[in-house]
Image (tube, rainbow, N blue to C red):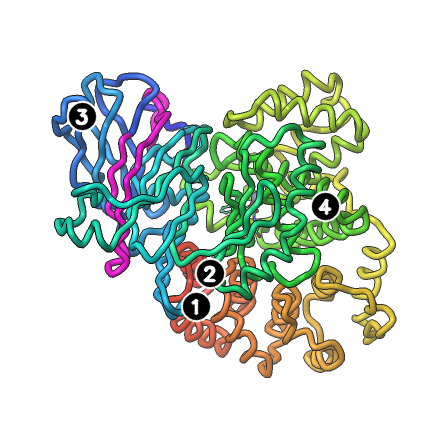
Amino acid sequence: MAPIDPHSYADSSHPLTTHISLSFYFDFPSSTIASSALLSLSAPHSGPLTLDTRSLSISAVIDSVTGAPLPFTLSSSPDAVLGQSLTLTLSNQSKLLILSTTAPSSSALQWLSPPQTFNKSYPFVFTQCQAIHARSIFPCQDTPAARIKFAAKLNIPRYLSAVMAAKHVNRRDPAAGECGGACDDSLWCAEGRVVEEFVMEQPVPPYLFAFAVGELGFREVGPRTKVYSEAVPTVLDAAAREFAGSEEMIKVGEALFGPYEWERFDLLVLPPSFPYGGMENPRMTFLTPTVIKGDATGAQVVAHELAHSWTGNLITNKNNDHFWLNEGFTTYAERRIVEVVQGKERAILNIGIGWRGLVEQMERFKDRMEFTKLRTNQQGVDPDDIYSDVPYEKGFQFLWRIERQVGRPAFDEFLKKYIANFKFQSIDTDMFLDFLKANIPGIEDQIDLKVWTEGTGIPPDAMEPASEIYTKIVLLANEFKSGTMPNEDDVAQWGGQEWELYLENLPKSVEASQLAALDERYRLAESKDYEVKVAFLQHAIASRCSSYYNEVEKTLKEVGRMKYLRPLYRALVQGAGKEEEKMFARRVFSEACTGYHPIAKGVVEAIFAKYL
Ligand code: BES
Ligand code: ZN
């Protein structure tokens, strides 16, 4: 028995799943899904086979060839990180049917009641499976080492529609008695329900499994791209404008990294509680509505998720210890796309914002330096708790360092070859290093690969970017210490990213009166741009400027993106002698948490557990 992934019960001596046929029956009143999952293994297997589950109830496991029930055991007490193992006992089977039901608390799913949506009329449900939440929807080998094709039938109320990170093949009436095993009223089934069918013909890791069900509409923005969201014309129009440049970006990606292998690149704008900025679900990227603000950032997030179509969805890490292979490469690829579509200055600004983020994380992890490494050891660790800029920005810095060493043309050639070589595989850091050394002979004598991949902290040959705008902003931020504010001329051309960089470079503790003066002049606390607003509010909390706490509360209640929740809650509860802020944080969380995605809720609870 040897585990293949610190975050999975899957065993190295067991065959992996290659295909799953799924049927889901969505029950909105109980916030549950009854499912049947037909797993096909790469080879027949005898003896125990262990799958991952979290908060699932299992009603039966069946040999799908003979129809005979198969013995199974669910481990009795759930592991806080891994959930429960489901052990089946097989005798030479390769196809098993598992019937199960999700819990309302399923960590991958957020069920929104009608009042929690834009249009207030219909319920909505969506998934977030990365890093290890697919197991809370159906039992599976929930490790990216497994690459799985699938077919899925979603039985949903007729007034809703479904999208998936998969190819849509049909919307049809349910067949007689086809109700996912959850309902015995066939008349109601046939009249009130509809079945949406999808297939995913390319093998994908379980963390890329995704769907959303609600009252959805779309706009066509390119030959390969539709933008979906709740069917609210103003939202759809704003989204269509924001993402109009998607086709151009796909073409840029193809020129840089090779053919786009996923046929379509659709986008889904979720309700504000979506816990991430974007999620690269194949064929259907999921996005927070907070990126729709008519500036460069919407395109930047799309560039990032699009870049995953090569670096991530084609080549992924075989487990989360090597997560940098996924996000570091994608951050590099994102910036290459941004450089082409938005220009070098914008790309450098993004590198600069990333650099600040990386430096910050060194402080956050000063007692847990393991998580400042590229290759990490995540045994016993919840990946959601240690999510950080490190794999993104240190990974980016590593690749940028190699690019500087060999020159851009040679590095571009290397990248294309790397992608073509490992596509549809899940790899680890050593496989990357071996490939690097084989294709760029002598690189190990020029760059200390061990320091980069195994060392803690920021390597000495990492580089802060330099450009006129970047350098000027950092300078202006330093001048703030001596009481100088940027003047109107300085900021005339600033967009959200410039302000974000400025605010992130301000000293950690600034005078409350100085902050108020800055806000008086530039209205940062009320910015429509959450990056700017949250960067400002963090300073306001650090300076204990309680006049801004109303705005903090409002922000924590209107968005569920963890990029905003984490720093605000952390600023409130971290450090001694802040009883008032701690009580405030507790109260706001207790009022806001019903609107948070379960993953976001868990992350805030982990912050409280650490500091309260
Ligand atoms: N795949 C990530 C989001 C993610 C990472 C979800 C780990 C769960 C676990 C996605 O590609 C991402 O990085 N999103 C960023 C966008 C950005 C860097 C432009 C985000 O959500 O902020
Ligand atoms: Zn990413």
Pick whichever of labels 3 and 4 is earlier in the sequence: 3
Of labels 2 and 4, the one closer to you? 2
Q: Is mark 1 within 8 Å of ligand 1?
A: no
Q: Residue at x 81, y 74 (%)?
A: 485
* Quadrant where the image shows the N terminus: top left
Crowdedness of circle 1 by 10 Å Cα count: few (<14), some, many (20+)?
A: few
In what element is the residue under mark 3? strand
In what element is the residue under mark 1? loop
Residue 371, horizontal then vertical, whole percent: 55, 44
Q: Which mark is residue 307?
A: none
Q: Quadrant of residue 438?
A: top right
Pick whichever of labels 3 and 2 is earlier in the sequence: 3
Q: Amino acid at mark 2?
A: Ala
**Chain part drawn in magenta:** 9-38
The quarter of the picture showing ligand 2:
top right
In what element is the residue under mark 4? helix
Q: Quadrant of residue 353?
A: bottom right
Q: Residue at x 81, y 29 (%)?
A: 407
Q: CA distance from mark 1 to mark 2?
A: 8 Å
Q: Which mark is residue 119?
A: 1
Q: CA distance from mark 3 to mark 4?
A: 51 Å
Residue 205, horizontal then vertical, whole percent: 44, 33
Dots 1, 2 in contact, CB < 8 A: yes
Q: Which mark is residue 231?
A: 2
Q: Amino acid at mark 3?
A: Asp
On the picture, is 237 further left or further right than 379? right
- Report which residue position mark 4 lands on: 338
Q: CA distance from mark 1 to mark 3?
A: 44 Å
Pick whichever of labels 1 and 3 is earlier in the sequence: 3
Pick whichever of labels 1 and 2 is earlier in the sequence: 1
In this rendering, is residue 356 above or below 370? below
